[in-house]
Amino acid sequence: MIFYYRARHADGLSVRGSIGADSREAAMSHLRARGLFVTLLETTHTARGALAGAVTILTRSASSRTAFFRSFATLVGVGISIKRALETLVAETRDPAFGEALRSICADVESGTALSAAMERHDGEFSRVVIAMVAAGEAAGNLAGALQSIAELEERNRALRKRVFSALSYPAVVAVAAAALVLFLIADTMPAFAGMFEQMQVAVPPVTRLLIGAGVALHSPQFWSIASVLLLALGVALWHYMRTSDAWASALDRAAMRLPLVGDLARKTLVVRFSRTLGSLLSAGVDVVASLETSTNVGGRTFREGLKGAVESLRAGNPFAAPLEVSGLFDATFLLLVRVGEESGTLDAMLLRIAAYYEIDVETGLAALTGIVEPALICLLGAAIGTIVASIIVPLYSMIGSIK
């Protein structure tokens, strides 16, 4: 269970962060042992805890974590103690919640706790993949190598996210600008003609009546109040169902993956993350069952449910590729490459090669999607503006005819 907290140090410094514990009492005991005066300690099941969790997530910096692992690997690799390395890096991080997590880990390590166990108390800041790789590095006596692998994995995943965001940001900006322009035309133009049409008793087509009504509504404070409440309620309901209803969220994920163009691109993006994570875990020395179980979390509920049988099959001693085929999440090329890697004993290296291969596919798909979306948005904008103009011109012609 994750608890979000706000607290003060003895010197008055205010901090906030998250901590994993079995109970509220255990979390409070751990924080007090660090000399903190706790002012808030809540889970996301409460309103205050949900707000604290949202603030922590929104202010989280992926770049801070990537830089941390790269620097941490370098410092540990040259023989600096874990405690001293953490103390040095705490002063450099600009993410307050992440810095507080590092201070807590430093205190735990100083008291004799293993680094992986200390990180596990902050699974809101460190993923299961990171914790598993650190634990494997500790067991093999190669913590610096494990940290280096984590840094590379974080950098590649971050680069993939940035490429996806960059490719989709321009169409998103165009779509928002187009929607704003259409709303402005409806709100500013249609009410101006409404009075004229009413005075001249012109027969107004249904589309024009609808647009005039929309323009009047956009000037109404009640409309914006009701729309805001409805949007907030819809957002809260979606967030609640995504967190509590696995069946509903899984159905939504599967539906998204069946969408034309976007669905295949989303699936390949998840395959890239899954392959790279699994390959990195195996390279770090984590056993294959634990690696697969951990890697299923990077693909969301669809991968987690689809590969549940694969984990059980591996535990029973079956080959690796067979249960992946049953899941229906991977294409024939992926499965063939996995079989080759399994037969040659180079499954970890093969999975990393698969990730690089599908990453090129994702980039190609993003370029194609952008090339389709941009002209489609322009056509939609032209159609919307044409509809607005036609809805004005048709009654104007009727009005001019009546004057004659």
Image: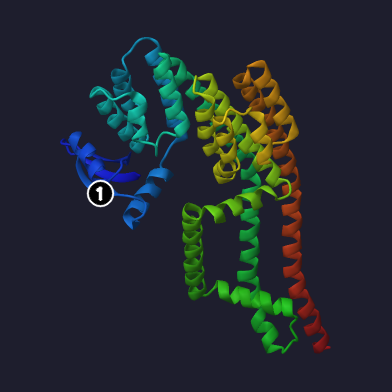
Q: Nearer the viewer, residue 263 or 369?
A: 263
Across and down, in percent, residue 9 comes to: 19, 37
Image position of 35 (left or right of 275)? left
Q: Nearer the viewer, residue 247 or 161?
A: 247
Query: What residue is shown at x 59% (from left), y 36% (from top)?
Result: 310
Q: Would you identify the image quadrant in which residue 214 lies?
A: bottom right
Query: What residue is shown at x 36% (from left), y 30% (from top)?
Result: 119
Residue at the far top: name it. 78
Across and down, in percent, residue 348 comes to: 59, 21
Number of labelled discs?
Answer: 1
Placement of the N terminus among the 4 image quadrants: top left
Q: Nearer the viewer, residue 267 or 399?
A: 267
Image position of 362 (left or right of 292)? right
Placement of the C terminus among the 4 image quadrants: bottom right
Q: Is residue 13 visible?
A: no
Across and down, in percent, residue 212 comes to: 65, 77
Residue that carries the numbered disc 1 in the rendered image: 40
Q: Is residue 77 visible?
A: yes
Graded by Cα atoms within 10 Å as few (under 14), some (14 to 19) or many (20 or more), the crowding at tag 1 reads some
**From the viewer's perspective, is residue 143 above or below residue 29?**
above
Q: Nearer the viewer, residue 161 or 184?
A: 161
Query: What residue is shown at x 57% (from left), y 30% (from top)?
Result: 314
Q: Amino acid at mark 1?
A: Leu
Image position of 165 (left or right of 401)? left
Q: Would you identify the image quadrant in which residue 21 lies?
A: top left
Q: Secondary structure at mark 1?
A: strand
Query: What residue is shown at x 44% (from left), y 36% (from top)?
Result: 61
Across and down, in percent, residue 219 comes to: 54, 73
